[in-house]
Amino acid sequence: MFRLKTAALAATMAAAALSAQASDVEVFGRLDTGVLYTVNQGDSKDTLQMSTGRSTGSRWGLKATEDLGNDWQVVAHLESGISSDTGEFCSSCGSRIFGRQMTLSLKNNSFGKIAFGRSGKPLSGSDEFTRIRSFTPFGVTYGDAGLLFYGKGGRVDNGVFYQSPRVVGLTAVLAASTQTSNQEEPEWTDNTRFWGGSLDWKGGNLGLIVGAEQIVVARADKETKDNPTTLLMGAYYDFGFMKLMAAYQKGWDLDRIGAFQGGSKLTIGGKNSIVRYFDADFYMLGATVPAGKGLVRLSALYMTGENAQRLANKSVSNDETKAGYWAVAAGYTYPFSKRTSVYGTVSYLQGTDALDKKYKVTTADGDLTRYQFAVGLVHKF
């Protein structure tokens, strides 16, 4: 009996302590679970599977805020990516408990916000320090319907992130990393570093953005890689009945083709891809159209580039160094409430040149040339 009373008292005290701090600590999250049907146009079998994070990455997290006075705040942000269909950590998070974001920040309405730790790069479309989502109809999610630019989903460790306050419509975001993954090596050049940023202007119905990023590869990788560099420009205009968007990205010395990772995720003729020194141009034209309480999303994507190294050993003809793809997509999202919504998308993606289906190009989803249909439910808390 004494133990039960002690346990009850401890539980009551813990609940009281949490209640006292409720205004400073926020528990948040979202779950996105749906069904994805892929119709492959090559040798891969069609698939029907439960999917997670199709429209927005499933996650949970904690955010703690303390007022330091004089309009200054310190903010701790801990965010864990999860797979809502299995309960496992998200595939891009590996074994990291808080693989989506782990930052400690100082914030001031006049100065802006500076953060230290792990977060998404400015042009990745991921996490807090990015501004590109409002310039794209699908953000960087929804699979093939999303923005298939090089920077998609990129997060860095050991980062410093800064976002300025909005001044005459302008907002600046800057970021740098002393080692993009894991702990820093003692010798500076043994680390893979990163720098990047964006500047956007929003006034009335018009928005403009420009940004640049570069990964500075470690000394040990210099023989097989160069420094992947990207430049992004985008714009939108809101007509009221429709928001029209366009974007362009130029990439130099890239180590993957768009959002498709190398290795086991991109194979040509059954062999893992080799992507080195890839120069490419990416184009996007999109729109969102209000329809009832929901939103229609439309996009067209095109990429063309040339690879200084062959994409796969003897899988592609010797004179075929160009590679590309194009995709079209349509979707609809409908909010049941402020926290719950449903979505549906249909997309078609086709590889060209060295990524043509005659070379039996596959990704983690099946053939590169494919149709995809998805529906899902999202709940935020």
Image: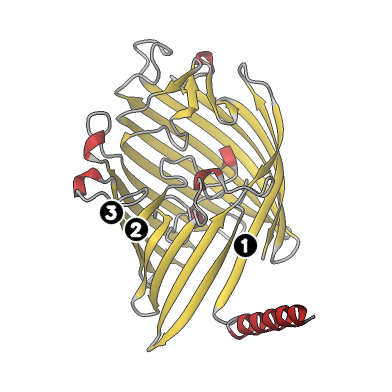
- For label 1, the crowd category at 10 Å Cα-Cα, with few meaning under 14, some 14 to 19 and many 20 or more, is some
| Three-letter residue code for mark 1 | Gly
Residue 367 drawn above or below residue 320: below
Residue beneath label 3, please?
178
Q: Is the residue 331 above or below the residue 157 in the image?
A: above
Q: Is residue 314 left or right of residue 11?
A: left
Q: Residues within 10 Å of mark 3 (few under 14, many from 20)?
A: many
Q: Residue furthest right?
A: 1
Check disc 1 and report the residue beneath it.
29
Q: Earlier in the sequence, mark 2 or mark 3?
A: 2
Q: What amino acid type should be assigned to the residue bearing mark 3? A: Thr
Name the quarter where the N terminus is drawn. bottom right
- The quadrant of the rendering that contains the C terminus is bottom right
Q: Is residue 281 above or below residue 160?
A: above
Nearer the N terminus, badge 1 or badge 2?
Answer: 1
Q: In the image shown, does 185 or 116 lie closer to the viewer?
A: 185
Label 2 secondary element: strand
In the displayed structure image, the side of residue 93 where residue 218 appears, left or right: left
The location of residue 345, given as percent across then percent down, is 67, 42
Viewer-side residue, 7 vs 233: 7
Q: Which residue is mark 2?
A: 159
Q: Amino acid at mark 2?
A: Gly
Mark 2 crowd level (few <14, some 14–19, many ≥20, 10 Å Cα): many
Residue at 38% in and 61% down:
117
For this orientation, the residue located farthest to the front is 2
